[in-house]
């Protein structure tokens, strides 16, 4: 497992702990003075009473907090995907030694997406002085200036869309990693998660579930009065799902890099 994946899991496990924690808050409303009488002279009693008073007075809505955690987890998944693709680029550079030996798709997409970013750098989160760096790097790559130790990885992973299945496939395809979700769906951990043995059916289920997660994310980011908030169980299931998909993607990146001649 890579450091990138380990950090991803660490953050999502923290999110799961947060979901578990807020699910216990409702117990504060059910506590009554008779139950707490045995500890009425302790500091714990004052603390619990204060928490209960604030919980009721502030009208804390667990749905909003759980919804915020969905936004965080999907955002963390998006950054994880981009980190994986950028890391693949760096490992390709190390293994290739020259620009010409990079995968064909990666070479062409570096030119295309560097051109897109330098036309409007601020749109993609880069300062104006970053343009000079991108141009210099691209020029050095094309002209085979050695040492060959850098490409514009920041440009290759730029996207304006949510991390749906087609976007994931596109990002990996940009660096020469084709049919990535097909390979992910055939992984034992993914098949087991869906209780399936058919990788094609697994891919359909993966696509459906990831799209449902992004739909949920968007409905929370732009809530309507009729929004249906996710339950604790739904959130936990989605977090476990992207952890499993993340592990499969992390493993597969190793295969793509090692296959470079």
Image (spheres, grey):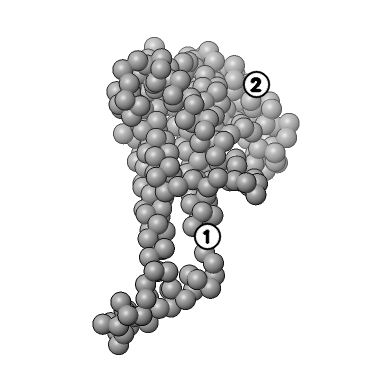
Q: Nearer the viewer, residue 243 or 53?
A: 53
Sequence-wise first label, 1 or 2: 1
Disc 1: CA contacts within 10 A as few (<14), some (14-19) or many (>=20): few
Q: Secondary structure at mark 1?
A: loop
Q: Which residue is at a point 30% across and 87% down the rendered structure image?
A: 41
Give the residue pinned by disc 1. Answer: 61
In the image, residue 141 sits, relative to residue 236, either above or below, namely: above
Residue 245 lies, in percent from the top left, at 39, 30
Residue 20 visible to the viewer: yes
- Using residue 247 as the reference point, say whether residue 137 is left or right of it: right
Residue 240 lies, in percent from the top left, at 37, 39
Quadrant location, the C terminus: top left
Disc 2: CA contacts within 10 A as few (<14), some (14-19) or many (>=20): few
Q: Which residue is at a point 54% across and 67% down the rendered structure image?
A: 59
- Using residue 177 as the reference point, say whether residue 247 is left or right of it: left
Q: Nearer the viewer, residue 233 or 247?
A: 233
Q: Which residue is at a point 37% across and 16% down the rendered structure image?
A: 199
**Do the numbered discs 1 and 2 sit on residues whose CB atoms are within 8 Å?**
no
Quadrant location, the N terminus: top left
User: How many labels were placed on the picture?
Assistant: 2
In the image, residue 62 sits, relative to residue 187, either above or below, namely: below
Q: Which mark is residue 73?
A: none
Give the residue pinned by disc 2. Answer: 112
Kindly report the distance in space between the C-alpha atoms of the residues bearing marks 1 and 2. Answer: 46 Å
Q: Which residue is at a point 26% across and 82% down the rendered structure image?
A: 38
Residue 86 visible to the viewer: no
Q: Nearer the viewer, residue 71 or 96?
A: 71
């Amino acid at each position: 497992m890579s450091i990138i994946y380990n950090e991803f899991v660490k953050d999502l496990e923290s999110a799961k702990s947060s979901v578990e924690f807020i699910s216990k808050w409702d117990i504060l409303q059910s506590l009554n003075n008779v139950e707490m009488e045995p500890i009425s002279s302790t500091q714990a009693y004052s603390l619990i009473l204060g928490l209960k008073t604030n919980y009721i007075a502030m009208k804390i809505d667990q749905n909003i907090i759980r919804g915020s955690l969905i936004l965080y987890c999907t955002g963390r998944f998006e950054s994880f995907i981009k980190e994986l693709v950028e890391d693949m680029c760096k490992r390709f550079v190390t293994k290739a030694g020259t620009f010409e030996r990079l995968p064909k798709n990666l070479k062409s997409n570096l030119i295309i997406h560097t051109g897109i970013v330098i036309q409007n750098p601020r749109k993609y989160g880069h300062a104006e002085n970053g343009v000079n760096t991108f141009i210099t790097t691209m020029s050095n790559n094309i002209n085979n200036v050695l040492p060959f130790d850098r490409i514009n990885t920041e440009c290759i992973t730029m996207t304006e869309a949510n991390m749906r299945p087609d976007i994931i496939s596109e990002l990996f395809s940009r660096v020469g990693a084709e049919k990535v979700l097909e390979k992910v769906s055939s992984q034992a951990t993914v098949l087991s998660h869906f209780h399936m043995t058919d990788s094609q059916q697994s891919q359909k289920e993966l696509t459906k579930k990831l799209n449902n997660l992004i739909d949920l994310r968007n409905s929370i980011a732009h809530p309507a009065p009729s929004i249906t908030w996710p339950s604790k169980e739904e959130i936990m299931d989605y977090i476990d799902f992207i952890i499993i998909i993340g592990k499969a993607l992390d493993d597969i990146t190793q295969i793509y890099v090692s296959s470079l001649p």
